[in-house]
Image: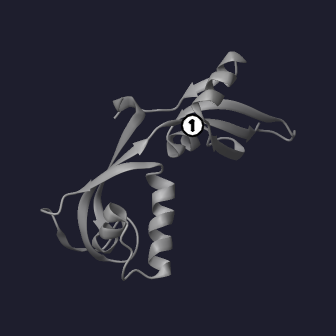
Amino acid sequence: MMKDLKTVKVEDFPEWAVCHIVNGDDEGLSDGDKALISTWVDQNVSPLAGCSVDTDRRNEFCSHPEFGLACATYPATFLVRRNHYLVSFKWPGDNDVFCTNLAYGTPSEIKDRYSKYTNVSLRLLLDSEVEQYKQRSMPMYDCSQED
C-alpha cells in the first residue's frame, strides 16, 4: 500500500494557506490566493491523499516560502496518490509520430520520466481500463520512486 503513496515534505508552507489545504476553508482568501494554492497543488502534490502540518515548528518569517510572498510558514508533509495513467506524447524529431504508453506514478513523476518528449498528456485510468491495456500488451512504465 505504501508504494501507492508518495511522501512530499515541504519545509516552508505558507501559514495563510494552511486552513485551505487542511480543512478546505477558504474564508478570507482572495480568488488570487485560491488560484495560487490550486496551481501549487496541481503541480506538486496532485492527486492529494492527505497532509499534516507541524504547527509546533512555526517559522515567524520566511522570505522564500513554497509559494507566494514572504510570510510565516510551517513544515508540512503531503501524501500523494500514485495511479495508472495513459500517456500520449510526440516522438522526438521532425516527424509527426505520436506514441501511447501506460505509466504508473504521480503526475509529476510521470512528467519527469517523459520530459524529453513534447505534447505529453496524461489521462487517469480506471482499474478496468488498466487491465484492458495490459491484455493488449501495451508498454507500461513504473515511474514511481521509492521514498
Q: Residue 134: image x %, image y %? A: 65, 20
Residue sitting at 34 percent across and 31 percent down? Answer: 2
Q: Residue 91: image x %, image y %? A: 77, 36
Q: Position of 7 compared to 114: left or right?
A: left
Q: Residue 89: image x %, image y %? A: 73, 40
Q: Residue 106: image x %, image y %? A: 49, 41
Q: Position of 87 compared to 54: left or right?
A: right
Colouring of the image: one colour
Q: Position of 58 compared to 135: left or right?
A: left
Q: In this figure, what is the number of numbered marks?
A: 1
Residue identified by numbered label 1:
113
- Residue 24 placement: quadrant: bottom left
Q: Quadrant of the N terminus?
A: top left
| Residue 90 in the image: above or below residue 67 | above
Residue sitting at 60 percent across and 35 percent down? Answer: 126
Furthest toward the left, the residue is: 56
Q: Quadrant of the C terminus?
A: top left
Amino acid residing under circle 1:
Arg
Q: What element carries label 1?
A: helix
| Residue 35 in the image: above or below residue 145 | below
| Residue 134 in the image: above or below residue 125 | above
Foreground: 109 or 20?
20
Residue sitting at 48 percent across and 65 percent down? Answer: 38
Furthest toward the right, the residue is: 95
Question: How many C-alpha atoms fall within 10 Å of the one at disc 1: few (<14), some, or many (≥20)?
Answer: some
Q: Position of 117 compared to 144: left or right?
A: right
Residue sitting at 32 percent across and 64 percent down? Answer: 23
